Amino acid sequence: MKKIVKVLQFILALLYFSASTAVEIQQGQIYSGGTYVESSFTGVGFTLPEPWKGIWPANSQMFIMEAQGIKANIFVYFDTGDINSLKNTLSANITLDQNIQLIPTGSVSHTENIYTAYYRLSNSNTIKGFISARVLPGKKVIAFISLAAENIAQKIEQQALTLAKSITITTPKNSSIANQQENSSDDESWAVFMKGKYLQRYFSGSNYHEHQQLWLCSDGRFLKKFSSGGSSLSGASGASANTWEGTWRVIDSADKTGELYLQFTNGGTSGYHLTFDKKIYLNGKKWLVAKKNTICQ
């Protein structure tokens, strides 16, 4: 009986030690292998394997892992979704960067709660891609994306698979930005609040003016317009107008800020840091929320 008690005490001590040494993930911070990182907002945590290091770069949607001397990377990506949307995503080309796409080389596989798929890179014949993903409670998805040289690809793929299987899941903290945002409810996150919004920004000065408009449709599409004008001593108006389309998504942060990402149909991307101080701010600049969105809902 005493042995059983000692074993239980040892297990409880380990659990306490693990919980007390958990590190809340922060942008711009580098984490060493063996560190247990977690996001209280998503309720997800995992331990960085040795000898890997990881960082969540500013204005990035992904947590990036790399190891010195190993020609490989593992990207950790978190998003909303269900099983069907995950299967559809894994079956299609996936844009990692403006010039890099993952192109599927086979069908999506499914073992228990893990979905996997293999890829080739659009700009390389020597790098292999692999994704190991799973659907989490609350219609959320986490994916571990590995890119590795062909001679070590299998080892890195196994590492990504192990990470997906070993994540810990806890109840996420309330990410509400209630009582902060105009027309928001008590349980609204940035991702929910921005759906269907029509945002505008005006600027004028020194005979120059500009007007930016951004429509964020509830189905994930966006339309952005920019117009400017002015006059010079020669009498030229300097007027210009541009329109962009694509898809958008928002990632909430534990500090009640958010990251808005625009994926343009021409392959380009753009990101905005979302904050609130009586008004909505994108990258520190105040935008107005219009009462009606006449383009889309």
Image: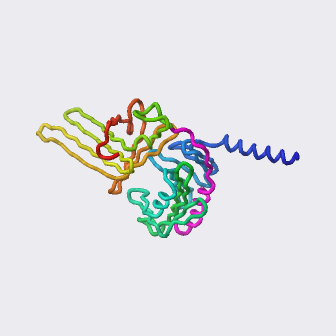
**Looking at the image, which is closer to me, 9 or 173?**
173
Q: Nearer the viewer, residue 271 or 296?
A: 296
Picture coordinates of residue 187 (x, y %)? 49, 37
- As drawn, 251 above or below 71: above
Residue 275 sits in quarter: top left
Residue shown at 32% from the left, 47% from the top? 296
Furthest residue to the right?
1
User: In the displayed structure, would residue 18 be above or below residue 110?
Assistant: above
- The picture quadrant where one finds residue 198 is top left
Q: Is residue 242 left or right of residue 272?
A: left
Residue 101 picture quarter = bottom left
Q: How is the image coloured?
A: rainbow
Q: Would residue 166 be found to the left or right of residue 218 on screen?
A: right
Specify whether 233 is left or right of 9: left
Instruction: Give the mark count.
Output: 0
Q: Is residue 154 magenta?
A: yes
Q: Is residue 156 above or below residue 217?
A: below
Residue 116, given in percent of the width and then of the height, sits at: 54, 63
Q: Residue at x 62, y 57 (%)?
A: 165
Residue 213, percent from left and from top: 29, 42
User: Residue 55 in magenta?
Assistant: no
Where residue 113 sits in the image (x, y, percent)? 59, 59
The magenta span reads 149-175
Looking at the rendered image, the quarter that the C terminus falls into is top left
